[in-house]
Image (cartoon, helix red, strand yellow):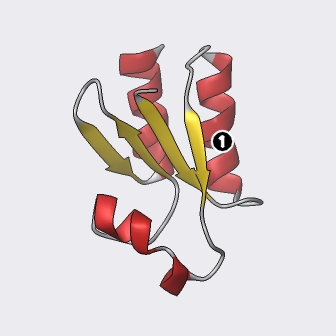
Amino acid sequence: MSITLYALDGCPHCEKVHDALAANDVEYETVWVEALHSGRNEVKRISGQRAVPVLVDDEHGVTMPESINILQYVERTLA
């Protein structure tokens, strides 16, 4: 799978990204992260920060935090 979404269960920003990916029939894998920022070492290793959502698109070589940027990327690149 070339698209991975790092997300937190119950996060409204993460849910918006999930909805956009599903609406555009994008296949992706979700990695559910810890609620505590200190437990998100994998997210920090990948994106340089611990906030979610973070989208990783291996096919295009993109790692992107911030839901608003991810939503634009989904519409412009993955839709």
* Residue found 27% across the figure and 68% down from its top: 48
| Farthest right residue in view | 10
Q: How many marks?
A: 1
Report x, y in % for residue 67. 50, 49
Report x, y in % for residue 33. 60, 64
The amino acid sitting under disc 1 is: Lys
Is the residue 71 above or below the residue 64 in the image? above
| Farthest front residue in view | 1
Q: Quadrant of residue 24?
A: top right
Q: Give the secondary structure at mark 1.
A: helix
Residue holding disc 1:
16
Q: Choose between 47 and 74: the one closer to the eye.
A: 47
* Residue found 55% across the figure and 19% down from its top: 26
Q: Choose between 29 and 64: the one closer to the eye.
A: 29
Is the residue 57 above or below the residue 12 in the image? above
Give left or right: position of 18 versus 76.
Answer: right
Report x, y in % for residue 3. 44, 31
| Farthest left residue in view | 61
Report x, y in % for residue 8. 65, 61
Give left or right: position of 12 versus 73.
Answer: right
* Residue found 31% across the figure and 60% down from its top: 47
* Residue found 40% across the figure and 27% down from its top: 2
Is the residue 1 above or below the residue 69 in the image? above
Packing grade of label 1 (10 A; few <14, some 14-19, many >=20) is: some
